[in-house]
Amino acid sequence: MSTPLDFSYETRPARVVFRPGASVSATPGEAARLGLHRVLVVCGSRGEATARAVADALGDACAGLHAEARMHVPVEVADRAVEVARELRADGCVAVGGGSAIGLGKAIALRTGLPLIAVPSTYSGSEMTPVWGLTEQGAKRTGRDLAVQPRSVVYDPELTLALPVPLSVTSGINAVAHAAEALYAPDASPLVSLMAEEGVRAMTAALPQVAAAPGDLDARSRALYGAWLCGACLGATTMGLHHKLCHVLGGTFGLPHAETHTVVLPYVLAYNASAAPQAITALSRALNTDDVPRALRELAGSLGAPRTLAELGLKEPDLPVAAALTAKESYPNPREVTANGVLGLLTAAYEGWEPRRDAA
Ligand code: NAD
């Protein structure tokens, strides 16, 4: 190694239980471990049947089920959920579902201080982070607060068997994006980098198997294992250009979350490659390739994921606006972020060109 090691690393108290069937078999025990007797179970409308099974397993320890989670946690949805938690005198919250349901659980934890148990059903990784988000009048605010970090996370790969293949693929690449940016984060550290590399390896190996046989529990387990590791990387580090750009595209232009991450990631990695050689080396090992941006784009595209921002609904006049918005915010990134640089990257992602190093 050419430079001496220099890092800080902090572990946070979070418990993880991982096994098929755990949503029903382990959640009651996790609630009991935290001393909870009246939890509110929250989920989205599409996840209600699964959440109902968790609520039934909790039995008397469940105070109610609230199936009102919506994408990006609108503030009025959060207000209502907090009211319900207070009316029911809940002493904790169990969020069952994807990033949207977990986001609602976090909003309740943020306002009330109630402990949160997460039972994720996608690969978004929100369950491993202290990051909350709330949307008010079209603008999404995010922040970090340890009070919202789930105290216990129950990973049940059986819950992901029904995750449609297109969403499995894009949600999986969303997870890969967390690990990729953790590798060049200013607060990267050796253990997190190991988790990142292993997370990318596990997820990218599992996705083709998931796409070929969505009901294969072994492939689903390995994808969810990858999602756990990638989510832990997201929670432990500060994200850069990729996450900021996707935040702008989602928040200002309404582009869908996981799909946007999937289209943009190869182009951001091509943009950052020359300034983050160690990250690219780790990703090359994980993906077994000497061209990381191209391999990622090929992987997602071959599994049916969208390849262009145009397909996701972005319009050509939006490109300079998005570039300017992304360049004017401040966040850490290995390569300097300029409006022109982002415009080049965005144009390539809009048209679906082959991602090329220094294309910007
Ligand atoms: P989501 O939770 O909105 O789920 C997407 C869709 O998939 C929904 O319609 C949902 O009902 C459905 N779904 C979820 N699990 C399913 C399953 N197992 N089977 C069938 N259908 C299922 O989307 P997401 O990608 O999981 O999360 C995106 C949201 O999470 C965004 O708002 C994003 O900002 C947030 N997020 C936050 C963090 C954080 O650290 N705070 C991290 C990642 C994502």
Image (cartoon, rainbow, N blue to C red):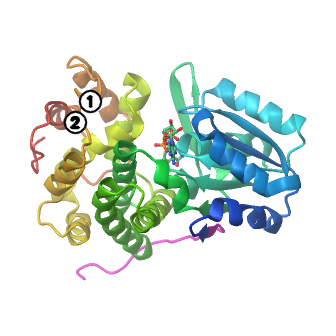
Q: Nearer the viewer, residue 328 or 85?
A: 85
| SS class, disc 2 | helix
Q: Position of residue 25 (x, y in %)?
A: 70, 65
Q: Is residue 6 left or right of residue 111?
A: left
From which residue to which does the magenta span run?
1-16
**Can residue 111 be seen from the camera position used here?**
yes
Q: Position of residue 305 (x, y in %)?
A: 26, 42
Q: Badge 1, how many Cα within 10 Å: few under 14, some, many 20+?
A: many
Label 2, on which residue? 342
Where on the picture, by quarter, is residue 2? bottom left
Does the Cβ of the disc 2 residue fall within 8 Å of ligand 1? no
| SS class, disc 1 | helix
In the rendered image, the quadrant that contains the C terminus is top left
Q: At x 21% / y 64%, what residue is drawn?
A: 280
Q: At x 35% / y 30%, what residue is drawn?
A: 249
Q: Amino acid at mark 2?
A: Val
Q: Position of residue 105 (x, y in %)?
A: 68, 44
Magenta span has 81?
Answer: no
In this rendering, the answer to whether 58 lies above or below 1 is above
Magenta span has 9?
Answer: yes
Q: Which secondary structure dominates the residues rendered in magenta?
A: loop
Q: Nearer the viewer, residue 262 or 163?
A: 163
Q: Kindly identify which numbered label has been placed on residue 323.
A: 1
Q: Badge 2, how many Cα within 10 Å: few under 14, some, many 20+?
A: many
Q: Are marks 1 and 2 in contact (CB under 8 Å)?
A: yes
C-alpha separation, residue under disc 1 versus residue under disc 2: 5 Å
Q: At x 14% / y 66%, what residue is drawn?
A: 289
